[in-house]
């Protein structure tokens, strides 16, 4: 594939830039960028047989110009059928995509493999991110793998200890910021980004890695697309990535229609739900986001336009669930199917239950829920105190 097959394009005005330029926003209008890849050839279900069992099996729709691919064999996570839970919730079929099986325990590893590979290609010596937890753990690991210095900015006292432990173990320099994730990201964009390569999802190369989960669903279901994909939404990069993946399958003739996407947010941090419900063309102010699901405790998602576009173009919707509903779903998934996830990863189960109760999902529907992070990421007492073993 020649270099002319890649470019960065503004999502609003369409301005184009060379893929090798370090940009996070359009120089003309200030909006976000996305990567466009025009493959000379593309994979098929048959051609994938025997390939490496990681996200890099989809190499035709991933960048191929890297000096070095920084990988921990991320992706190719299991899709588990949850028959008992499907019956309890009232849908035809229910599957759980186990993204907690990625190397550092979350879906973020997909994006970091591509993003850190790009950092190496561009000659960066240091990488940086703001994080609610999983991003910092993942970036720290991949930076270590690549031999790069890593700095992470986290909201003080608002990150699960398991995730903080990972970032420290992988050698990241950690800065605690007073306020929410939104303040931490603002600091990265305004100051830290001048000294290091930014690897939050404002970076379009992150999305390129995360879109591979859509390819996996297509492959794991034998090419089917007659299902809803339900996933938690924080900064909106992941739902945008799924939609980008499905659109690329459409554009290359691998599917004739795409699944509908359902974004799930916590009641205390649900600006995307407001945009969809009220049909807004702007992001409403959301101060002091709060939820027990720390991974999606974000009030000003930087990828909101991409996320809203993904929901609208796919014919999907956005749902808000309470912390109580998230915890109930967390326990239900674990006790009924033996599948445990961090709180944000159980939000899709809570959303399915609510949508069935509201008559928007039912006995004819197939649903895939994305469990975004491993259960051991977050082991706070309030998450487990419901079932403490009794002394004998």
Image (cartoon, rainbow, N blue to C red):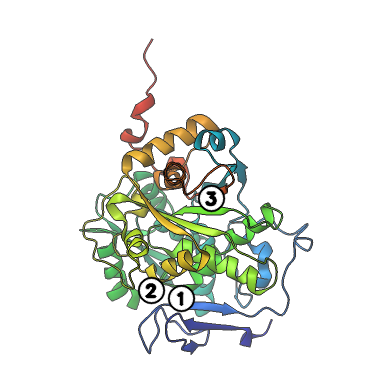
Q: Which label sits on residue 253?
A: none
17 and 354: which is toward the camera: 354
At mark 1, the secondary structure is: loop
Q: CA distance from mark 3 to mark 2?
A: 28 Å
Tell me the crowding category of disc 1: few under 14, some 14 to 19, or many 20 or more residues within 10 angstroms, Cα based. Answer: some
Q: Say whether residue 359 is left or right of residue 259.
A: left
Tell me the crowding category of disc 3: few under 14, some 14 to 19, or many 20 or more residues within 10 angstroms, Cα based. Answer: many
- The answer to whether residue 16 is seen in the rendering is yes
Contact (Cβ within 8 Å) of mark 1 with mark 2: yes
Q: Is residue 154 above or below residue 345?
A: below
Q: Residue drawn at (70%, 67%), measured in percent from left and top?
A: 254
Q: Name which quarter of the figure residue 329 lies in.
A: top left
Image quadrant where one finds the C terminus: top left
Tell me the crowding category of disc 2: few under 14, some 14 to 19, or many 20 or more residues within 10 angstroms, Cα based. Answer: some
Q: Earlier in the sequence, mark 3 or mark 2?
A: 3
Looking at the rendered structure, the number of numbered marks drawn on it comes to 3
Q: Earlier in the sequence, mark 1 or mark 3?
A: 3
Residue at the spot of label 2 = 196
Q: CA distance from mark 1 to mark 2?
A: 7 Å
The residue most toward the front is: 359
Q: Position of residue 288 (x, y in %)?
A: 21, 56
At mark 2, the secondary structure is: loop
Q: Residue drawn at (45%, 61%), measured in percent from left and top?
A: 139
Residue at the spot of label 1 = 124
Q: Say whether residue 179 is left or right of residue 328.
A: left
Q: Residue drawn at (24%, 54%), measured in percent from left and top?
A: 156
At mark 3, the secondary structure is: helix
Q: Position of residue 301 (x, y in %)?
A: 34, 65
Residue at the spot of label 3 = 99
Q: Position of residue 323 (x, y in %)?
A: 32, 42
């Amino acid at each position: 594939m020649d270099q002319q097959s890649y470019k960065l394009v503004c999502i609003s005005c369409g301005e184009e830039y060379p893929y090798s330029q370090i940009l996070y926003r359009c120089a003309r209008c200030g909006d976000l960028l996305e990567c466009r890849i025009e493959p000379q050839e593309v994979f098929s279900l048959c051609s994938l047989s025997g390939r490496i069992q990681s996200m890099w099996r989809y190499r035709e729709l991933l960048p191929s110009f890297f000096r070095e691919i920084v990988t921990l064999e991320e992706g190719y996570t299991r899709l588990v059928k949850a028959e008992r839970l499907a019956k309890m919730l009232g849908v035809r079929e229910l599957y759980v995509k186990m993204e907690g099986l990625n190397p550092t325990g979350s879906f973020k590893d997909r994006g970091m493999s591509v993003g850190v590979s790009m950092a190496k290609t561009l000659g960066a010596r240091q990488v940086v991110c703001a994080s609610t937890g999983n991003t910092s753990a993942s970036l720290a690991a991949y930076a270590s793998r690549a031999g790069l210095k890593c700095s992470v900015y986290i909201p003080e006292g608002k990150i699960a200890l398991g995730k903080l432990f990972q970032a420290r173990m992988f050698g990241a320099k950690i800065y605690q910021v007073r306020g929410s994730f939104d303040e931490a990201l603002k600091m990265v964009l305004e100051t830290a980004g001048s000294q290091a390569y930014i690897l939050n999802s404002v970076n379009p190369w992150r999305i390129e890695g995360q879109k591979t989960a859509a390819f996996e669903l297509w492959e794991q279901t034998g090419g089917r697309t007659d299902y809803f994909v339900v996933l938690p939404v924080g900064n909106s990069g992941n739902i945008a990535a799924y939609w980008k993946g499905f659109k690329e399958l459409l554009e290359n003739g691998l599917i004739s229609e795409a699944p509908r996407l359902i974004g799930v947010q916590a009641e205390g941090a649900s600006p995307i739900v407001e945009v969809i419900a009220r049909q807004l063309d702007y992001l409403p102010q959301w101060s002091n986001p709060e939820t027990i699901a720390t991974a999606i405790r974000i009030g000003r998602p930087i990828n909101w336009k991409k996320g809203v576009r993904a929901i609208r173009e796919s014919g999907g919707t956005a749902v808000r669930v309470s912390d109580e509903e998230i915890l109930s779903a967390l326990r239900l998934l674990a006790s009924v199917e033996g599948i445990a996830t961090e709180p944000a990863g159980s939000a899709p189960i809570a959303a399915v239950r609510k949508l069935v109760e509201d008559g928007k999902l039912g006995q004819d529907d197939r649903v895939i829920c994305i469990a975004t992070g491993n259960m051991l990421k977050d082991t706070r007492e309030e998450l487990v105190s419901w079932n403490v073993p009794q002394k004998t």
